[in-house]
Every structure is written in structure tokens, then in C-alpha cells.
């Protein structure tokens, strides 16, 4: 028998023959208590001009919680409150990289009270709450790895059984906190947000403290993790990312639009508590058993289509589930 | 002094003060001999119907060399020779995942001579040539890591100095061969192509040998590496991927277009040797010093914008440079 393809047979021979759930099925079956409401005050709603067919376009961004990037997020709240982005535009769409927006003229006056945030704030000290969550998470991973080792004798699983299967090439450790993926150093003393698909960051010039939050970008390709700790991340797109990722690519250097008429007008940007017709959103608690099962299933696809579970996953391949709440 | 941000200073203090090149600058400076011509017979040209503004749209795919996926590629050459895809369409665009094309009716008769390829061929035995290339590559990485350790005392670099900085979470090893990224097992006996952005694969039904090559997809999001060894990869888009990645997302399940008029007509698919007006393409030899320097720079950005090199990179974050040859 080909040694590569025995895993489904082993699962078939398990004492209790349950149909194996896909990651999406695990999420769909998660109990209501595992879902956490996102406060409208932590959302930012960007309304673009309608597309060529007249269809309205809206992008909803969730802002990060403490301890991440609160200096820039404070600026962003002020910019939104001042309606500063109204009349600006999307200026850059670089394939497999980023969509970027802000004031193409670079002349627009900033509202009062923005602060310069030092680059030291690209990382944060972990809080006591994060320590507790982290310990629970590691305990959960140990259980998961044990289960994997029992079910399979694939080299990779054995080799990795002394540590969580979710290693990383850009940070010594990774984890999830309050619904957000993060990287951390060897002792988990310092934590930082990571550049996954859909994450939103603060454009800057060469000086690393030069980003105010007025110029923003979102990732629309393979995770550019080399940007971690080199630029601030402040949130993620949770709805309508297709209104950015499917825009025509810019033909100028770095994907900037060459003609002003190519730019996509931004009609308004509002904090969610000031926006109308805002659906309620919720995320799957990253402390929940549902999330641990989902992450395990992302790293080890055992559902019918798959003949070979990977035995691991990078943190950007375990996107935190976010959904519209039932009204 | 903040210990996180000393690296640029160290580089500034290096004996020979050279401006540090970006990965793109390293590629631009590579000698002509480091570039390898891609045979037109290894290219496939897909012409789509013009877009709403009448702009022509063409996608150029490079097919993989031996030892990868040659059974499916043989089928694909037969399908192209029979002009089988002419009149088919792009049927699925799922955000952060794939664009898929083929015969939406599933009724079109197949050309004679297609073979059923067993799933065992998702992996290949490495050839003697691959062994030689691999040994040279590992030797090159050792030199690179030594250099990194001298220049920086970052924990992560020290921690990783016993092995190449390009580890992987989905395969025990990774490498590059003849211009292609691959994964391999612990002893490098078995090799397989990896699902990076722009890679092209063979859609299939549940039976793992059910993909003929008539139904194809390309990756337009974060690398879905869990598909490695679960589905065949046969090539990559080297030109015109924006004609796929910027298409409107499908609103049906899995991103399929719900209405037939949303589908994008495929006018023709031809092997490059049969195509007209085909530019010549070349890739940066993955055995060259230029490529090793480029990969090192992708994993350790030391150019002016960056304050914190990552100390590693995943294989899909080191895309092999491909360019149009100077005519």
C-alpha cells in the first residue's frame, strides 16, 4: 500500500465513525456563545463611488484592540471624525500586494490633534490577559498535537510533536488574542500584529515614525510578512474586500494609477457608531474550543476531498472567522 | 538604545559602505548569463474576450518541467492542440483563493488520447540532477546564514543558524529546481510542486485521479499550501495574471458565477509554439548567485525602508523572477 495515502483509512477505522467536518462546517456548528460581538465603535465604514454598473461599494474595517497600535488608531478615529477621507481616493492597486488609499494630492490639511507615533510601537508588551490566554492556547495545542500523533504516523507530525504545529518563519512564536493573529518573540514578552490577507496598515515614508494613519493600505495577495514590525497594522477588512481586491491594477510604479481618472473616489469614511445601515458583526472567539478545532482542521484537512493532511499551517492560513450576526 | 532597531546602524558601520540593494535591484543587476530562456513550447497562451472597455486580455502560463506532473501536462498539450478550450469560459472567481476555468456545460467531448493520471503522481522521485542542485543550494544557504550571523545578533538568526532560513510548515524541506519552487520530504527523496500565488492546478472531483487537466485554476490569494499533494499543479501564470485576479468575484458557492453572462469567454488557448505575437520570456536561474542573493534579500530586507529584517521567508514569498527578454 502506498504509504502516502493511508490517513483516510485510519480515520475510517476509528472506533466512532463520525463524518469528518470541513473547517467551514466546524465554524457553522459553533455554539452561539463562541461568537463575540464587534462593537460598532471598533468598525470603520468606507463608502466608494458606485462601480461602472452603478453598484454601491462599501468596505468595512475592524480596528485592533489594545495592546496593538493604539497611537495610530487614535489618529484614525480623529481623521474619521473630521470626515477627512471624504473626497480622497484609492490610488494604488498592486497585484499580489496591496491596495492603498488616501489624499493623492498630499496637500490636504490634517485635522488638529494627530500625534507622531514612534516606531517602538510597532511592537507591544504583552498584557497579563494575554499571558493567561497564551497559556490556555498552548495547553490546547498540546492536546491537539497528541491527538494528531495518535491518528497518524506521518514523519512530519512526529517531528513536530514537541511544539505546536503552527510554527512560523517570521516570528519566534505566533498566537491569537481577542480574535487577532499575532507574532511574538522567544519569551512572548513582545507581541505584534501580522501582515495577513485583508490586514490594514499605515503607509509611511522613509522615517519609520512618519505614518499618521491618513494613508492606509490593505493586503490583497500572499502575506507580505517581511513588513511585520517595519510598518504599523491597525485593523482588517471584514466585509467588502472584493471591492478593493478586484479593482484594476495600476500600471505605474508600485501599482499606482497613472491617470487621475483611474482613481476610485472615496465618498466617505465613518466610524461604525456614526454609520447608517451598519450590519452587526461577530467573530469566533479565538479562545473557544470551536476555534481550536477549526485551526486544527485548517492544518489537517481530513474531510473527504483531502488525501493528505498537511500537518501544519501558517498563521495567515488560519483566518479568524467573522460573520454578520443574525438580526 | 532600543535593541530592536540597531541593524541599519551596523550595516552603516560595515567596512565597505555599499548602498544595500532591494531584491528587485539585485534582480535588475543580474548578469545576462543568469537568465534562462523559456521555450515557447513550454508556454500556453490563453486569450480572453476583451474587457468592457474593449481592451484585449491575454494570460501566459508556463508549464512545469520533468519530474513534475507530466501526465497531466501531456493531457493539457493534447487539449490545447485540439483547441478544446476555445469557446469555454472562466466560471469561478473566489476571493483570496482561486480563479477557475473550463467547460461550464460539462458536456463538451474530450479529445482522443487523454490518460487518467494516478494520484501517486502528485509527488515525484527526485532525479540525479535535482540531487546535485540541492547540494549546491544547501551549501549556498550555509554561506548566507554565516553572513547573516556576522551582521546581526538577533535571537531569531542565531536560533536558526544551524539550518537554512527558508524552513516550511507544510513540507519537511523546500527548494528550487530549474526555476520552480518545490517541497520535499525529510530525506529529499520525494518532491512536489507547491501552491504559491499564480500557480496553475488541475481541478478534480472527489476521486483523486479524476482531474484530466481540462478544468484548471490559478491561485489569486494567500498560498493555499494545504492543497499541496492533494491536487496536481502543472504550471504558473507568468504574464497577465491581473486579467484573472481583478475579475469580479463570483457570488455563488465557492465563488462560482451564478449567471452564465457573468462568465468570461475564453477565445482560444494555444501552446506557445503555435501562438502569434508571443514575447520571449526568461527566468532567473535558481542555481545562480543572483538568485541566492535575491532570496537572501527577500528574507532579510536591509534596504533603506526596513528597520527590522525578518530573518526568514516562506517559499511563496520568494517568487522566481520572470521577465520579458530584451528583443
Image (spheres, coloured by chain):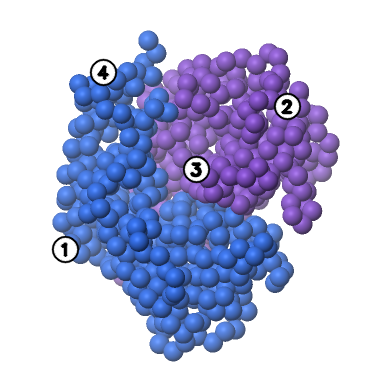
Chain colours: A purple, B blue
Crowd class of label 3 (few under 14; some 14 to 19; many from 20; radius 10 Å): few
Crowd class of label 4 (few under 14; some 14 to 19; many from 20; radius 10 Å): few
- Marks 1/4 same chain: yes
- Give the chain of mark 4: B
- Marks 2/4 same chain: no
Task: Measuring from the top left, give residue B57's x and y in whole percent.
Answer: 56, 65
Q: Residue furthest right?
A: A276
- Marks 3/2 same chain: yes
Q: Nearer the viewer, mark 3 or mark 2?
A: 3
Element marked by disc 2: loop
Seen at 61% across and 30% down, the residue is A215
Mark 2 → mark 1, Cα distance in angstroms: 62 Å
- Marks 1/3 same chain: no
Does the image show residue A107? yes
Q: Which residue is mark 2?
A: A84
Q: Which residue is mark 3?
A: A253
- Give the chain of mark 2: A
Q: Which residue is mark 4?
A: B13
- Give the chain of mark 1: B
Does the image show residue A290? no
Q: Quadrant of residue B60?
A: bottom left
Amino acid at each position: 500500500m502506498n504509504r502516502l495515502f493511508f490517513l483516510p483509512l485510519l480515520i475510517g477505522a476509528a472506533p466512532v465513525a463520525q463524518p469528518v467536518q470541513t473547517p467551514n462546517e466546524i465554524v457553522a456548528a459553533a455554539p452561539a456563545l463562541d461568537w463575540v460581538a464587534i462593537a460598532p465603535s471598533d468598525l470603520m465604514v468606507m463608502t466608494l463611488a458606485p462601480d461602472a454598473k452603478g453598484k454601491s461599494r462599501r468596505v468595512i474595517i475592524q480596528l485592533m484592540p489594545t495592546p496593538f497600535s493604539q497611537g495610530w488608531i487614535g489618529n484614525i478615529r480623529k481623521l474619521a471624525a473630521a470626515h477627512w477621507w471624504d473626497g480622497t481616493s484609492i490610488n494604488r492597486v498592486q497585484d499580489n500586494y496591496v491596495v492603498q488609499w488616501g489624499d493623492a494630492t498630499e496637500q490636504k490639511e490634517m485635522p488638529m490633534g494627530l500625534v507622531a507615533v514612534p516606531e517602538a510601537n510597532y511592537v507591544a508588551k504583552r498584557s497579563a490577559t494575554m499571558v493567561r490566554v497564551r497559556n490556555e492556547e498552548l495547553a490546547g495545542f498540546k492536546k491537539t498535537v497528541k491527538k494528531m500523533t495518535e491518528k497518524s504516523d506521518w514523519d512530519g507530525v512526529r517531528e513536530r510533536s514537541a511544539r505546536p504545529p503552527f510554527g512560523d518563519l517570521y516570528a519566534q512564536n505566533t498566537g491569537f488574542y481577542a480574535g487577532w493573529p499575532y507574532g511574538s518573540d522567544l519569551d512572548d514578552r513582545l507581541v505584534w500584529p501580522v501582515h495577513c490577507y485583508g490586514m490594514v496598515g499605515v503607509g509611511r515614508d522613509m522615517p519609520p515614525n512618519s505614518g499618521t494613519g491618513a494613508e492606509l493600505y490593505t493586503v490583497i495577495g500572499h502575506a507580505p510578512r517581511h513588513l511585520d514590525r517595519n510598518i504599523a497594522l491597525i485593523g482588517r477588512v471584514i466585509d467588502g474586500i472584493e471591492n478593493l481586491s478586484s479593482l484594476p491594477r495600476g500600471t505605474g510604479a508600485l501599482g499606482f494609477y497613472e491617470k487621475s481618472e483611474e482613481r476610485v473616489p472615496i465618498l466617505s469614511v465613518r466610524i461604525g457608531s456614526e454609520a447608517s445601515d451598519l450590519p452587526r458583526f461577530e467573530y469566533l472567539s479565538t479562545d473557544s474550543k470551536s476555534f481550536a478545532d477549526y485551526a486544527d482542521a485548517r492544518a489537517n484537512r481530513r474531510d473527504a476531498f483531502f488525501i493528505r493532511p498537511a500537518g501544519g499551517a501558517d498563521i495567515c492560513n488560519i483566518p479568524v472567522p467573522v460573520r454578520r450576526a443574525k438580526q
